[in-house]
Image: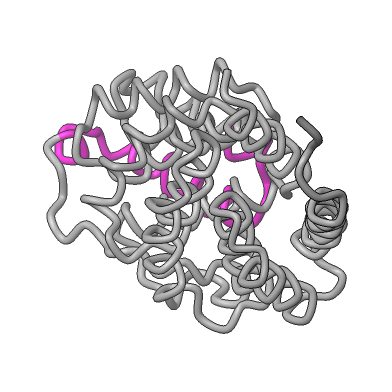
Amino acid sequence: MNSRIWLSISDMLGFVQRSPIARRSQVLAAMLAFSAGFTSAQVDSAQFADKSQSQDNVSVNQLLTPTKAQRATKKAREDLIRGRFESAQREAELALDIFPRCAIALNIQGAVNLWRSNYVEAARDFQRAINADPALGSAYLGLGVTYTSQGRFKEALVPLDRASAFLPGSWTVHFEAALSHLGVGEPDTALKEITYAERFMGVDPEKRAGVSYLRGVAFFQLRGYDEARVELNKALTLDPRGSYSTLARRRLEQLKSTESNKEIERSAGPAPR
């Protein structure tokens, strides 16, 4: 395997392992709320600033869902948004006992399993949700996040691309897509996704630091070391105590080491013949 790509994959795995998975599943919870017709006023805007495009039309799957199951999924969504994952799981199971093809309930189960790092089960739940309701954008997002959480970046690109069609205004979709493109050694495409993510990041310092960090990684892969340094230092400034700052410091050390090695190579001159 190309060493440059391998470095990218190992670094991205480190990034995912240090990312707050609980927060990522909470963002997904907000997506579930938006896609199910909640208004933004019903979501804590400070915690769930991902302004996804709501699905204006009720899907066939939602129309077929019995009233009792709808009430259970409504309660499950509320629990999920508030971080009450165990209760959300129970309510989702109740909905599925009533209507086994309830896409929203399957989606909620996927979010809970993602929070628990039960990736096999999460992927199964999100895929079942997609099968039940192919227009449920948050299920594609959930499947993509499940794959990126495991470092399966190439596999993540397909559901994330589908998610972008249903959730075009989602910071999370574009951020995860950028991460995946970096993971497979495609920094140019990652930069495009980062630019899209930047449009929807708002004023959240963690999101802003995350965007700068990924852009710094992209420039690093492209060997644009000066640009990489600027972006990584920006991540440090935007959220000094956040998880992305820890990663940015590590990358800056790596950048320093890389430049030192190149300086040694230059000073040594051409190898004797």
Residue pictured at 60% horizontal, 52% vertical: 26
Quadrant housing residue 119: top right
Q: Is residue 87 magenta?
A: yes
**Against 169, is 259 above or below?**
above
Quadrant showing the N terminus: top right
Q: Residue furthest front?
A: 273
**Against 107, is 20 above or below?**
below
Give coordinates of residue 21: x percent, y percent: 69, 43
Residue pictured at 83% horizontal, 58% vertical: 263
Give coordinates of residue 192: x percent, y percent: 37, 60
The range drawn in magenta is 61-89
Q: Is residue 13 left or right of residue 110?
A: right
Please name whichever residue, 45 or 87, is drawn nearer the observer in this view of the structure.
Answer: 45
Please name whichever residue, 18 or 256, is drawn nearer the observer in this view of the structure.
Answer: 256
Name the colour scheme: one colour
Q: Main secondary structure of the magenta part?
A: helix
Residue pictured at 19% horizontal, 40% vertical: 135
